[in-house]
Amino acid sequence: MPLSVEIVTVERTVLQEEGIDEVVAPGADGQLAVLPEHAAFMTMLQPGELILKRGNDELPFAVTGGFFEVLDDRVVVLADAAERVEEIDMQRAEQARERARQAIEQRESIEDLAAAQAALQRALIRLKIAETRRRRRERPT
């Protein structure tokens, strides 16, 4: 029995998909993989790449943290933010990175610093994942 996967953020349901063979996620204690009939568990997500696999196909997402739950061949990702790699606008992500770097330099409080560091981390994750996937697609076969 394949996995049923749901990826949800505060703003929207990013994905509801049946028939997934494997989910690879950036867990709190490192990379984790979930196959059908996996034991139930819940963990925190770290910012990184979430990959859904069906046969030889991969559906990659950039996530910026949240929670990951497995129960009865159902995977629920409650992400702080999540987007398909194809949705990542490299120019916008570069601009976000630059704004975050400037905010770090101009911070006025510890709260400003924490918010700017989180924004920088999100931008860097998005850029890294999008660039890695772009290079994989361009590789000659």
Image (cartoon, helix red, strand yellow):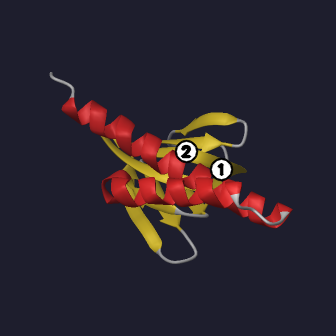
Looking at the picture, tell me which residue is in the foreground, 118 or 59: 118
User: In the image, residue 33 lies at what x, y percent?
Assistant: 55, 36
User: In the image, residue 11 lies at what x, y percent?
Assistant: 52, 78
**Is 7 on the left-hand or right-hand side of 15?**
right
Q: Which residue is mark 1?
A: 45
| Crowding at mark 2 (Cα within 10 Å: few <14, some 14-19, many 20+) | many
Residue placed at 47% from the left, 58% from the top? Answer: 5
User: In the image, residue 88 lies at what x, y percent?
Assistant: 37, 57
User: In the image, residue 86 lies at what x, y percent?
Assistant: 30, 54
Query: Is there CB contact under 8 Å for labels 2 and 1?
Result: yes
- Image quadrant of residue 51? top left
Q: Is residue 38 visible?
A: no
The disc labelled 2 sits on which kind of residue? Gly
**Is 6 on the left-hand or right-hand side of 90?**
right
Residue placed at 71% from the left, 63% from the top? Answer: 115
The disc labelled 1 sits on which kind of residue? Leu
Looking at the picture, tell me which residue is in the foreground, 134 or 114: 114
SS at mark 1?
strand
Q: Is residue 112 visible?
A: yes
Q: Which residue is mark 2?
A: 48
- Image quadrant of residue 69? bottom right
Distance from Cα at disc 2 to Cα at disc 1: 8 Å
